[in-house]
Image (spheres, rainbow, N blue to C red):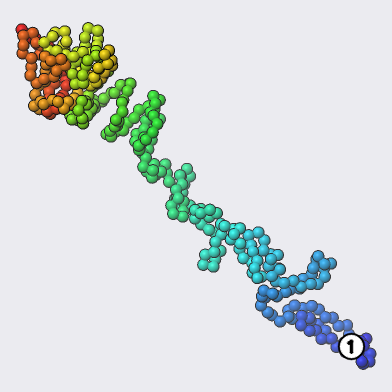
């Protein structure tokens, strides 16, 4: 029974299902069922709400905004704004948007995913080429850095510059082919072995300045009073002193003093045994034979001719101030 206000009591004659409901009727047991298909279609927009059963409120029927639902669904790496879920690039630096499309960020920057070229193989070295990574073999790496390949266990066949450090006795052999080994220092100790076509090239025929030489040089003890450029002999005590062609005891000459000894006592000096010597006080004719003179330590283009003088050829003039010193140890005495 239904009572209508201001009216009289009476029976319900009909039940009509409204929006979102189905069923109804005008006789017998009438059932009305929730039917969402009966609702009018609409586009969901920010600010809209949807019905929910609230588990936190004893399963009561409630409504919730679409914006809150989007925030709920936005998990790690996602962000919701105005009911729209998007990728949070701030927490996903390996992703990027390109032409409105989400893709993996490729390249060599931080968080990028490196892209390897198709030629990368096992045991390759890796080289960055623009925004990709390519494989390089050992020989290609040596070429890239301007070095040659190492061969064998005890020798370097070719290499770039050795700018520092030392080569020790355990280094082994150095084979530099037809290239030159150049030094302005001293090569000391050990032996220099030449092959059947090897050449020992000491230097050119023109030392660069006065009282300089290139050739075979040794160090010996000299008596005091010795000057640079003087011819020297070895006395009975094994010490160097100045030659004199008219005194048998001061011959033969074995070298040219490259250092002076004015210390007042014996001292070590360098002596040119064979090679090229320059003295700016010379005034020789190129090609002239050279001899030991009758003045102390003198080298002259005039052979001694006095009775009892000793003639010893010691070299030849290369230029007016440069000589090739290569003494013969044979002496000829004028009778």
Residue 129 in sight in this render: yes
Residue 11 in sight in this render: no
Question: Is 307 located above or below residue 205 in the figure?
Answer: above
Question: Is 261 located above or below residue 54 in the figure?
Answer: above
Identity of the residue drawn at 23% across and 21% down = 258
Q: Which residue lies most toward the bottom here?
A: 7
Q: Quadrant of residue 211?
A: top left
Question: Is 281 located above or below residue 162 in the figure?
Answer: above
Identity of the residue drawn at 13% across and 15% down = 295
Secondary structure state at the residue bearing disc 1:
loop
Question: Is 311 located above or below residue 48 in the figure?
Answer: above
In the image, taking residue 266 as reference, residue 8 lies left or right, namely right
Relative image position of residue 313 (x, y in whole percent): 12, 17
Relative image position of residue 61 (x, y in whole percent): 81, 72
The crowding category of the residue bearing disc 1, from other C-alpha atoms within 10 Å (few below 14, some 14 to 19, many at least 20), is few
Report the front residue among 97 and 34.
97
Report the front residue among 319 and 176.
319
Which quarter shows the N terminus?
A: bottom right
Number of numbered discs: 1
In the image, taking residue 302 as reference, residue 269 lies left or right, namely right
Report the front residue among 245 and 194.
245
Relative image position of residue 155 (x, y in whole percent): 37, 30
Which quarter shows the C terminus?
A: top left
């Amino acid at each position: 029974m239904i009572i209508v206000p201001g009216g009289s009591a009476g029976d319900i004659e009909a039940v009509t299902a409204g929006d979102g409901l189905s069923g109804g009727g005008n006789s017998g047991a009438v059932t009305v069922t929730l039917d969402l298909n009966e609702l009018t279609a609409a586009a969901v927009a920010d600010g809209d709400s949807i019905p929910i059963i609230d588990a936190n409120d004893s399963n009561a029927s409630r409504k919730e905004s679409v914006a809150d639902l989007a925030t709920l669904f936005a998990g790690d790496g996602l962000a919701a704004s105005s009911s729209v879920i998007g990728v949070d690039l701030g927490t996903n630096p390996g992703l990027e948007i390109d032409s409105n499309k989400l893709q993996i960020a490729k390249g060599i920057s931080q968080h990028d995913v490196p892209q390897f070229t198709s030629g990368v193989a096992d045991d390759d070295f890796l080289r960055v080429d623009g925004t990709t990574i390519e494989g390089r073999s050992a020989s290609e790496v040596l070429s890239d850095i301007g070095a040659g390949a190492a061969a064998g266990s005890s020798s370097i066949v070719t290499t770039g510059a050795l700018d520092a450090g030392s080569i020790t006795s355990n280094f082994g052999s150095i084979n530099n082919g037809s290239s030159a080994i150049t030094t302005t220092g001293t090569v000391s100790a050990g032996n220099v072995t030449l092959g059947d076509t090897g050449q020992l090239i000491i230097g050119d025929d023109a030392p660069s300045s006065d009282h300089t030489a290139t050739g075979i040089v040794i160090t010996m003890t000299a008596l005091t009073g010795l000057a640079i450029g003087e011819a020297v002999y070895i006395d009975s005590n094994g010490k160097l002193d100045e030659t004199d062609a008219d005194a048998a005891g001061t011959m033969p000459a074995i070298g040219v003093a490259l250092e002076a000894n004015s210390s007042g006592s014996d001292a070590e000096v360098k002596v040119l045994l064979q090679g090229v010597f320059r003295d700016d006080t010379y005034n020789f004719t190129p090609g002239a034979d050279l001899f030991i003179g009758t003045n102390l330590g003198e080298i002259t283009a005039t052979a001694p001719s006095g009775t009892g003088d000793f003639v010893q050829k010691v070299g030849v003039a290369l230029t007016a101030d440069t000589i090739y010193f290569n003494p013969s140890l044979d002496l000829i005495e004028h009778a």
